[in-house]
Amino acid sequence: MRVNVVLSPNQVDELYFTGKTAVVIDVLRATSTILTALENGAREIIPVASLEFGAKISANSFGGKIVRGGEKNMRKIEGFDLGNSPLEYTREVIEGKTVVFFTTNGSKAIVKTKFSKATYIAAFLNAAAVAEKLKAAGDDVEIVCSGRGGEFSYEDTICAGYIIKLLKSNDRTLRLKDSAQAALTLYEESAAKLNERVKNSEHGMLLSDAGFEEDINYCVRLNVTGLVPVFLSNSIKK
Ligand code: MLT
């Protein structure tokens, strides 16, 4: 198995993913929120790359069955039902709902992989389950870090490195591209102080300043769910 890490979605275009297996990470907070919503019974998440498209497909809420979630500048968008804090996506709020989901980086990165053979949604919350899924399939994999504004992000790259660490155990056939090796090295250097590292990342500090420190604590927990959601035909399901 060959593993590449796309350090920013801006590195590649949509066609790059054609027929490949992809994993998308946005630890803070999009993929952590998607996992939480599905864990708490959401029917599906429809990620969108533009607010206009999101508004179009959610124009009819079908009696509240379709809700709008996500953020702009970390805050709930006007007219939306939910923001991008995973803590908002409780079972009481989300069970049975379809979430049309827009975020600044994460939802766009997911949509970018739409021509993939399969795209798995990953975060620290489900890293071990993702690694197991990838091992079982045995395909080459592209791990996409959603980053921030097209730039490298610390927390997504550390999470990519953690998944690689888990893939690597007992697998002598694993071939790491340099980006994957760099992510692994970053993870190994950060493992003992994960919470601190993520909090001190650019996005971590912005979230703390905006009053979302609890979200960071929530998102840095390892392997609390066995869910590995798949993005297929425009929809993310468990
Ligand atoms: C994103 O997609 O950019 C994020 O999830 C931003 C956020 O923390 O809300």
Image (cartoon, rainbow, N blue to C red):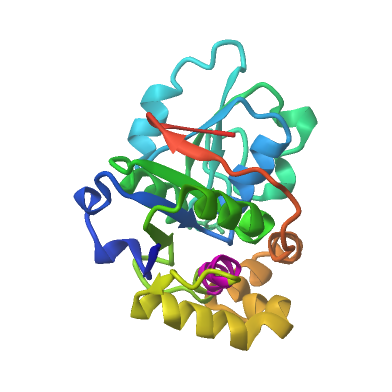
Is 181 magenta? The answer is no
Q: Where is residue 72 drawn, in percent x and y?
A: 48, 52
Q: Judge left or right: residue 60 versus residue 84.
A: left
Residue 4, relative to residue 72: is it above or below? Answer: below
Whether residue 83 can be seen here: no
Where 39 falls versus 190 (above or below)? above
**In the image, is 172 to the left or to the right of 87?**
left
x%, y% of residue 203? 55, 71
Q: Residue drawn at (37%, 72%), measured in percent from left and top? A: 151
Does residue 120 appear left or right of residue 89 in this picture? left
Judged by its main secondary structure, the magenta piece is: helix
Residue pictured at 40% horizontal, 38% vertical: 48
First to last magenta residue range: 158-168
Which residue is the extreme one toward the top?
A: 63
Across and down, in percent, residue 131 comes to 57, 57
Residue reaching furthest bottom? 189
Q: Nearer the viewer, residue 47 or 135?
A: 135
Q: Position of residue 201 (x, y in %)?
A: 57, 78
* Residue 192 visible in the snapshot: yes
**In this image, 104 relative to 52: left or right?**
right
- Place residue 199 in its image quadrant: bottom right
Task: Tell whether position 164 is magenta.
Answer: yes
Q: Toward which corner of the image does residue 209 lie, by quadrant?
A: bottom right
Quarter the C terminus occupies: top right
| Residue 223 vertical position relative to residue 159 in the rendered view, above or below | above
Residue drawn at (62%, 38%), measured in percent from left and top? 82
Residue sitting at x 34%, y 41%: 117
Quadrant of image for the N terminus? bottom left
